[in-house]
Amino acid sequence: MSDIVKFKIDGKECVADEGLNLVDAAKQNGIYIPTLCHLEGIKPAGSCRVCNVKINGRFMTACTTPVVDGMEIENSTEDIQELRKIIVETLFVSGNHYCPACEKSGCCELQALGYKFTMLVPRFPYAFEPKEVDAESQKLYIDRNRCILCKRCVRSIKSKDGKSIFAIKGRGHNAMINIDHELAAQMTDEEATKAMDNCPVGSILKKERGYYTPIGSRKYDKEPIGSDIEESVII
Amino acid sequence: MSKPIVATTSLAGCFGCHMSILDIDERILDLFDLVEFNKSPIDDIKEFTKMCDIGIIEGGCCNSENVHILKDFRKNCKILISLGECAIMGGLPAMRNNIPIEECLREAYLDGPSTKGHNPDGIMPNDEELPILLNKVYPCHEVVKIDYYLPGCPPRADLIWNALVALVTGDELKLPYEVVKFD
């Protein structure tokens, strides 16, 4: 059994298992740290940077930082929220995010963070870079216009013998998500749904499923992202 | 004190944002008590007849006429508001931004399912009376200075109402979670 440690987030006393990452540790204490790339139970990647918190005056990604005893964390100060908002705005202008035409709209975590930070307009110019759509697979299609390269699909969706169905191709500016069509052809409906649900944006979508939930009943139509965490304290 | 004057226009938009202005329902009567309308499709005044306080822009800029009207609004309005996704980020018309313009025109006039074989001379609209298409669709704030942004497709009627009342009365703008949406 691991040791229980005490730590503080914005002055609030918290407890969690030692070594647990800060996002999940905060969650157990009813505190929401925004994330896009983090998935509970999957090895953190620290790629989206939205979960930035301040520890001892330094910015750290909460998903890759294990909690230790006596840690003092700043989470919802004005400068941290502003930094997160800047990251969200950067993601909006670097992809082609046409929310009104997107099947994931209303259930999209990137959009939900835009709502949370009351993003009325990104402060940066739109890139409008051409990206390709891969609709070859029978069950899924990939719209790279919306991909934020969080690698959730790479890390969490595997074939029965443990092979990655998704992978990043290219590096840096040319990096893009790719799908192994052979492995994808063997996916069950449940696995395809999981791939779609794990994608924080509308980049991986299950075919013949678009606009399933009516406007008004979608995940983030009425409640801001993270409000379920802030309402419930597990410990 | 005279009432603040409002002008509105739809550039590369679908008039949905204007429909959403009408969605304030009976509050439109209160609106007419609060403000006076000048150039706008709502009262069908075609040209500016005086300096306006608030200009509401629907739609982005996809052609030379859009740019001309937008600049005219900037010149004749003290405050400009980008209303809706198209004005803010180009919206659905901007989905052509990653397709070469020649390809767009070929699809529309030569190779599209409803034109293929019906345009043997390969005619494309090319009259000096017609506005010229821009290389891509631009958000309004990349063409002129925009003062405020009201997102949505369309922006919720309550958002438009809250914003106009706050602007006219000087009260603080309320932005409840349900009214700020991108779709």
Image (cartoon, coloured by chain):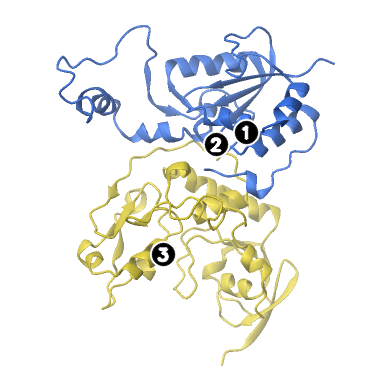
Chain colours: A yellow, B blue
Q: Which residue type does callout 3 highlight?
A: Arg
Residue A136 vs A40, above or below: the answer is: above
Residue mark closest to the camera, 1 vs 2: 1
Q: Amino acid type of disc 1?
A: Asp
Picture disc at residue A152: 3
Which residue position is annotated with label 1? B23
Residue identified by numbered label 2? B154
Give the total of numbered labels. Answer: 3
Of tags 1 and 3, which is closer to the observer? 1
Q: How many other residues sit within 10 Å of disc 2, few (<14), some (14-19) or many (≥20)?
A: many
Residue A125 is left or right of residue A22, and the answer is: left
Q: What percent of the width, then of the height, locates residue A126?
A: 46, 37
Is disc 2 placed on a helix, strand or loop? Answer: loop
**Among the 4 quarters of the image, the one containing residue B122:** top left
As measured in the structure, the alpha-carbon distance from the residue carrying label 1 to the one carrying label 3 is 40 Å
Whether pointer 1 and pointer 3 mark residues with C-beta atoms closer than 8 Å, the reply is: no
**Vertical placement of residue A21 versus B157, above or below:** below
Q: Nearer the viewer, residue B60 or A20?
A: B60
Q: Chain of mark 3?
A: A
